[in-house]
Image (cartoon, rainbow, N blue to C red):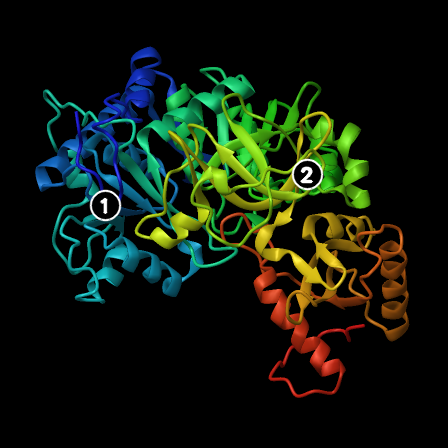
């Protein structure tokens, strides 16, 4: 049966009649584990300072999402309608997401941390047909009259101020007698999830119901996740996978838009209070948690599995977290992107015992072997669209090229961005390949190595330089927290500049200390062929990073900053007012 698709989103339901609604996984969990806690939320603290929790069982969560979906349907929401969901991580967020799926609507998810200007840009692209959002967002919508003419179905989550319309509570009053979720096809859109825009404007990635189902199966099977486990997800959307797997979600006490500022005490409190067995988070979270555990000689007793993604996990973070886990516990780093997840995976133990030394010598970051059913190919680097696979030149083992991926978890298109879709997808008969925007290579054992983002390649007169490979050499210095390679000047004759962010409290403060630090960096550069040409170093107090994971470095902002610093050093005019240690 064909279901209406979101405007501008292609659907192949007629040619793929399989009925898949990802919300059916919640119904199944409710039938199998009705009294098991589905979601646990830290609601506040009592007079003794103890955390108090709100919670829903699987049966309650399924019933609540049914009532919400029934209420949305009575409002006039129909399959394919695009509704922006802007609700803080909570019981309501998870219930509403499943309600939208059950109603056949397309949930639009945008990171609130990207700021009003970028959010409005995303919303202008989507042309939403409604907002299911907190009061502040609804007020902002009303204060911009005429900007969202199609937004007819708006639900306030929380207190309704000076406007009318339905609320979360009013939807809960809907009867569910005979309620049936929409029978969506596997290829019907379920959500539009925006990228962070770390290498360009944020793009809406179209997720289909079948893709969500494939992700659940891949993650459950590979990591051997069992019903009854308890997960603490540092990224709100991962709570949806838990409900599909019969796993309890403990919502962490943190600001999801600032994972690098997470309070490790509150994370440990959630783990200890609820006996958490699994946790997912950005490397920025585990950097703080692991460091705290090592300092306090704490062990994450109940945690047997930690997942971390969003960017390569620094080797010191792997060491501190592995040290903090109890015997038998492991940290794994799945590789992927908003457009394709998961692709590969590797454990911290394997990294620390087999690949870390090569990484520190400039080999890149090993991200492991592909998941079953996921195909990965390395092709010649190109900035041009590649319409057919016959236009592609595959590269042999050991040669760095573009990483391309094909499989059931790979998304098909960007919403209303045909040029971006054309640049990112390659047709190959009945299937297609996604260009990850990353570069890397396969080693002799079939493991994939990540070498950096394609957009961040530095092109010099002597050839290409890859960020992840070069930076790892300098990250071995005990004073270096992280580093960033950028190119100054025009390609293909850029000057490679290595920008270094020292650990907190380790920034050189005197001229002699600075000279000594730079001399040590130059000595590191001389240790490998790939870094020998780097002779220019700059110091930066805090790198700009992405808003979702707080770990991806915005080299697009650092490159012009570096150019200004070098111009200042050369006595050329510059509008920069940044007061930082002198570049060398």
Can the viewer see residue 263 in this picture? no
Q: Are marks 1 and 2 in contact (CB under 8 Å)?
A: no
Question: Tag count in the figure?
Answer: 2
Instruction: Residue lying at the far front in this picture: please name it.
Output: 390
Q: Quadrant of residue 106?
A: top left
The front one of 147 and 246 is 147
Name the spot of residue 289 as percent of width and height, x first: 64, 40
**Mark sitting earlier along the chain (1/2):** 1
Establish if 314 lies above or below 226: below
Q: Characterize the local packing of mark 1: few (<14), some (14-19) or many (20 or more) Cα atoms within 10 angstroms.
A: many
Read off the residue under disc 1: 82
Instruction: Residue lying at the far top in this picture: please name it.
Output: 32
Q: Is residue 127 left or right of residue 175?
A: right
Q: Quadrant of residue 322?
A: top right
Callout 1: helix, strand or loop?
Answer: strand
Name the spot of residue 158 as percent of width and height, x first: 25, 48
Q: Is residue 24 left or right of residue 444?
A: left
The front one of 305 and 63 is 305
Q: Characterize the local packing of mark 2: few (<14), some (14-19) or many (20 or more) Cα atoms within 10 angstroms.
A: many
Name the spot of residue 256 as percent of width and height, x first: 47, 46
Establish if 311 lies above or below 409: below
Residue at point 75% right, 52% down?
Answer: 470
Name the spot of residue 327 as percent of width and height, x first: 71, 19
Read off the residue under disc 2: 290
Residue at point 10% right, 21% down?
Answer: 177
Q: Is residue 330 left or right of residue 528?
A: left
Residue at point 75% right, 68% down?
Answer: 538
Establish if 2 lies above or below 400: above
The front one of 370 and 524 is 370
């Amino acid at each position: 049966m064909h279901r209406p698709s979101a405007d501008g989103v292609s659907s192949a339901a007629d040619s793929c009649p399989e009925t898949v609604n990802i919300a059916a996984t919640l119904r199944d969990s409710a039938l199998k584990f009705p009294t098991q806690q589905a979601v646990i939320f830290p609601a506040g603290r009592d007079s003794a300072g103890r955390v108090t929790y709100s919670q829903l069982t699987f049966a309650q969560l399924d019933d609540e999402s049914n009532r919400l979906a029934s209420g949305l349907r009575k409002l006039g929401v129909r399959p394919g309608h695009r509704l922006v969901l802007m609700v803080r991580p909570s019981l309501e967020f998870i219930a509403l997401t499943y309600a939208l799926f059950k109603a056949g609507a397309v949930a639009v998810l945008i990171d609130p941390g990207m700021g009003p200007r970028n959010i409005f840009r995303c919303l202008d692209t989507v042309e939403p047909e409604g907002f299911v959002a907190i009061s502040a967002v609804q007020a902002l919508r009303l204060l911009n009259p005429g900007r969202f003419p199609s937004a007819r179905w708006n639900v306030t989550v929380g207190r309704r101020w000076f406007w009318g319309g339905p609320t979360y509570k009013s939807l809960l009053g809907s009867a569910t007698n005979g309620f049936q979720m929409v029978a969506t096809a596997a290829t019907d859109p379920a959500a539009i999830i925006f990228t962070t825009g770390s290498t360009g404007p944020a793009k809406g990635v179209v997720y289909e119901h079948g893709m969500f189902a494939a992700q659940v199966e891949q993650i459950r099977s590979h990591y051997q996740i069992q019903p009854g486990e308890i997960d603490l997800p540092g990224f709100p959307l991962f709570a949806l996978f838990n409900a599909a797997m019969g796993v309890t979600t403990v919502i962490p006490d943190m600001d999801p838009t600032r994972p690098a500022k997470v309070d490790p005490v509150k994370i440990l409190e959630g783990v200890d209070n609820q006996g958490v067995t699994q946790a997912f988070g950005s490397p920025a979270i585990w950097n703080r948690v692991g460091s705290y555990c090592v300092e306090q000689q704490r062990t994450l007793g109940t945690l047997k599995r930690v997942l971390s993604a969003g960017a390569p996990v620094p080797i010191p973070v792997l060491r501190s977290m592995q040290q903090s886990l109890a015997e038998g516990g492991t940290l794994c780093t799945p590789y992927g992107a908003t457009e394709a997840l998961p692709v590969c995976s590797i454990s911290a133990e394997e990294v620390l015992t087999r690949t870390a030394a090569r990484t520190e010598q400039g080999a890149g970051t090993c991200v492991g072997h592909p998941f079953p059913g996921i195909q990965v190919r390395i092709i010649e680097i190109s900035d041009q669209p590649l319409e057919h696979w016959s236009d592609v030149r595959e590269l042999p083992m050991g040669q760095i090229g573009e990483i391309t991926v094909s499989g059931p978890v790979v998304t098909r298109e960007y919403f209303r961005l045909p040029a971006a879709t054309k640049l990112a997808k390659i047709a190959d008969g009945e299937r297609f390949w996604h260009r990850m925007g990353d570069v890397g290579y396969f080693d002799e054992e079939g493991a994939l190595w990540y070498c950096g983002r394609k957009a961040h390649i530095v092109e010099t007169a002597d050839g290409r330089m890859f960020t992840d490979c070069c930076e790892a050499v300098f990250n071995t210095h005990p004073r270096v927290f992280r580093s960033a390679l950028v190119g100054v000047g025009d390609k293909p004759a850029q000057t490679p500049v290595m920008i270094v962010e020292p650990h907190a409290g380790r920034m050189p403060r005197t001229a002699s200390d600075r000279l000594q630090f730079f001399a040590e960096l130059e000595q590191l550069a001389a240790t490998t062929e790939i870094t020998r040409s780097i002779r220019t170093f700059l110091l930066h107090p805090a790198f700009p990073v992405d808003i979702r994971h707080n770990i991806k470095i915005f080299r697009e902002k650092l490159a012009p900053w570096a150019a200004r610093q070098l111009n200042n050093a050369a006595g050329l005019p510059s509008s920069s007012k940044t007061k930082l240690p002198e570049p060398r």
